[in-house]
């Protein structure tokens, strides 16, 4: 079976990493796999490093004629059976090809965020798919509420490659509280900074430091906010770095997302490393994390509750050990192999005659 993966983003984030994980696993199982993305996209370089077949596209706009022609040619020349899209723009491109392309194929969309679909075309491009994969049950429910046929919806959580994550390392100095994510409104970085300011005002042990890893349009605004809150000497903004490189240097991790979360990769990555977690109570997070078992769960947007949970972890090493150990067991349910096996079953279901 030949599968073409489409991703029209120009960033390298969790969703793109999932595409490479999946393509790599499919190739090992004998599938013909191609990843198509805009020329210069990081995913093309990462995929090529894994010896995966890549196809550069002219741009990231789904309506661009060059993209339509290029992907149509790929489908025809490489005998593509399944076009699998991984972001909103590529979902639109796949739907366009389904409508106008001369070659027939099965269309699969993966939806990674829990925001409702908007507008006629926003819904229709997903309705044209043979299958839509939600990476959490919450996302599946949102898609069904938008009018998609539930028979065409399925849930496959994202997975991670456990071998990529070294265990938490010791370090000199006080404990380090980490946050990893794009500097965008849905990730709750403002809540995190407010929680740190609250923690600094009530904690007896002020030896802790905090590190914010990620980039995005709110970077300058968030740095200014940290300075106004008196956190300039305590919080470091590193810009983008690979999570596997920074997580082992943390002592605990906050995941304070306030909206839009899918199947959080950083929660799983933290468990793989052996970190205790505080996570917000978004429905998709609660499909992964259980309060007082493998994480502490706090209300989304509640900075004081987040501060109190962080304070508990700083003060209770035994709780940290218990949460981390439970997390290591839980992450075994979310490996890249498990994710790929589920997708392979899905692909095969599209061709019952084979």
Image: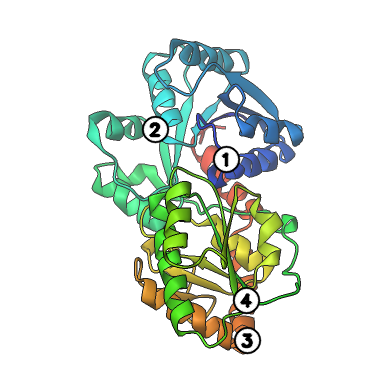
Give the labeled residue for mark 1.
Answer: 16
Quadrant hosting residue 42:
top right
Which residue bears the numbered disc 4?
324
Q: Assign a secondary structure to mark 3.
A: helix
Q: Which residue is mark 3?
A: 317
Q: Residue at x 60, y 71 (%)?
A: 209
Mark 1 to mark 3: distance in Å? 35 Å
Name the front one of labels 1 and 3.
3
Q: Is residue 92 above or below residue 237?
A: above
Q: Earlier in the sequence, mark 4 or mark 3?
A: 3
In this figure, which residue is indicated by the disc labeled 2?
A: 129
Disc marking residue 306 = none
Could you classify mark 4 by the number of other residues whose Cα lies within 10 Å: few (under 14), some (14-19), or many (20 or more)? many
- Between disc 3 and disc 2, whose residue precedes? 2
Q: Earlier in the sequence, mark 2 or mark 4?
A: 2
Q: Are marks 1 and 4 in contact (CB under 8 Å)?
A: no
- The front one of 108 and 151 is 108
Q: Name the foreground residue: 351 vs 295.
A: 295
Give the CA separation, mark 3 to mark 2. Answer: 49 Å
- The C terminus is located in which quarter? top right
Kindly report which numbered mark, 3 or 2, lies closer to the viewer in this rendering: 3
Q: Please tell me which residue is depicted at 42% across the width and 66% down the height of the picture.
A: 229
Q: 25 or 222, which is in the foreground?
A: 222
How far apart marks 1 and 4 lie (CA) works out to: 27 Å
């Amino acid at each position: 079976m030949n599968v073409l993966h489409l991703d029209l983003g120009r960033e390298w984030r969790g969703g793109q990493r999932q595409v490479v994980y999946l393509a790599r696993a499919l190739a090992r199982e004998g599938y013909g796999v191609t990843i198509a993305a805009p020329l210069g996209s990081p995913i093309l370089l990462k995929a090529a490093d894994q010896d995966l077949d890549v196809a550069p596209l002219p741009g990231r706009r789904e309506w661009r004629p060059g993209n339509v022609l290029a992907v149509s040619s790929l489908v025809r020349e490489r005998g593509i059976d399944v076009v699998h899209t991984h972001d909103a723009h590529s979902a639109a491109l796949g739907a366009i090809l389904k409508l106008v392309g001369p070659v027939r194929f099965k269309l699969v969309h993966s939806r990674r965020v829990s925001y409702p679909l908007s507008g006629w075309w926003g819904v229709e491009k997903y309705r044209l798919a043979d299958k839509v994969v939600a990476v959490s049950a919450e996302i599946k429910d949102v898609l069904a509420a938008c009018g998609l046929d539930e028979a065409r919806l399925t849930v496959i959580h994202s997975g991670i490659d456990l071998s990529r994550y070294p265990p938490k390392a010791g370090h000199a100095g006080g404990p380090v509280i980490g946050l990893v994510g794009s500097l965008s409104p849905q990730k709750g970085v403002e809540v995190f900074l407010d929680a740190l300011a609250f923690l600094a005002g009530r904690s007896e042990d002020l030896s802790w430091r905090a590190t914010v890893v990620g980039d995005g349009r709110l970077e300058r605004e968030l740095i200014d906010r940290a300075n106004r809150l008196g956190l300039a000497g305590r919080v470091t903004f590193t810009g983008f770095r690979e999570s596997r490189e920074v997580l082992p240097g943390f002592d605990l991790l906050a995941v304070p997302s306030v909206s839009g979360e899918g199947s959080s990769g950083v929660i799983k990555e933290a468990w793989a490393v052996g970190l205790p977690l505080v996570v917000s109570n978004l429905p998709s997070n609660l499909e992964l994390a259980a309060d007082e078992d493998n994480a502490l769960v706090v209300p989304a947007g509640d900075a004081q509750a987040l501060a109190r949970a962080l304070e508990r972890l700083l003060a209770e090493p035994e709780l940290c050990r218990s949460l981390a150990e439970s997390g290591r067991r839980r992450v075994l349910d979310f490996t890249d192999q498990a994710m790929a096996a589920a997708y392979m079953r899905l692909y095969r279901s599209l061709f019952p005659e084979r």
